[in-house]
Image: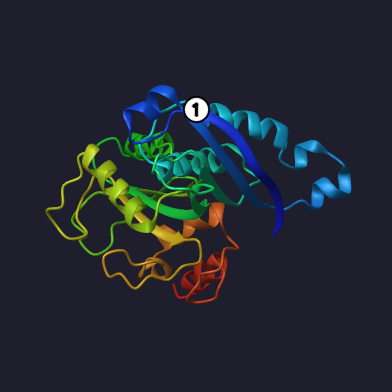
Amino acid sequence: MDKIFIKDLEVFAHHGVLEEEKKLGQKFLLSLELDLNLKKAGTTDDLSKTVNYAELCSKVEIEFKKEKYDLIETAAEKTAEFILLNYNLVKTVKLTLKKPWAPILKPLDYVAVQIERSLHSVYLALGSNLGDKKKNLEDALNLIDLNPLCKLCKVSNFYTTAPVGYLDQDDFLNAAAEIKTLMSPSELMDFLLEIEKKLKRERKIHWGPRTIDLDILLYDDIVTEDEHIIIPHPRMQERLFVLEPLCDIAPYKLHPLLNKRIIDIKNEIKAMF
């Protein structure tokens, strides 16, 4: 991956645990290492194909000074989030935040933290068979998109499908969505469960009727060992109501365990009927 480096951008801000630090402020030094593809910029000489680092420095300074945080860890985290959510070309940010005037009463050059953050590509399955099904799906998608740590990228068509497992219930409306997120799998799962709660999902019957069902299908190319968050979703390759909408938005995505494209898995299932 190609890189852009920005070293020791000096910003005067008001972060620190001590009240005097928040009141008087002090100097901070920000260094950034941005991973992105610079091939198009290099071959076209077009500024829009890269990151305008003059603009980036200005915006980072404004963002860095917006709030007063106790910890430089928090200031670093918020700055990395800002860059990833506002510069689509940037895949990964490595950020070093130095605090030269740290009030620890010892001789030193600086204290610093360094973090590395990336946006994760996630595919979700959505389903509803109670109430206004279409509105339930749309409300869930809107709530996802409102989260500052998520970006809604693609949404499939909506499909009406028969229930599976517990059959004495109405047909489902199903969809799939691609998001980019800064959340870990665990954090994202907790967030999706919160949305289900907001939309009045009740878990009374296994595979029973529900206002909304949200599942993580794929998260980057990871395979988890956590039985509470199983990724890839353990039954996605068996379910046409998952594969059909997923093919709308990611037909050539590889399943990390089966090493097959989603469209090929779907066609294999269809051929069985």
Q: How many labels, in total? A: 1
Residue 150 visible from this viewpoint: no
Secondary structure of the residue carrying tag 1 is loop
Q: Nearer the viewer, residue 56 or 205?
A: 56
Quick one: 83 or 192, which is closer to the camera?
83
In the rendered view, does 155 fall on the left or right side of 166? right
- Residue 257 location (% of width, % of height): 47, 76
Quarter assignment of residue 31: top right
- Residue at the left extreme of this rendering: 204
- What residue appears at the point 45 percent right and 44 percent down from the top-left corner? 77
Q: Is residue 101 above or below residue 63?
A: below
- Asked where in the image residue 61 lies, by quadrant, the reply is top right
Q: Residue at x 52, y 45 (%)?
A: 97
Residue 82: image x %, image y %?
52, 37
Residue shown at 64% from the left, 50% from the top = 34
Q: Look at mark 1 in the image and give the residue it sits on.
A: 65
Residue type beneath disc 1 = Lys
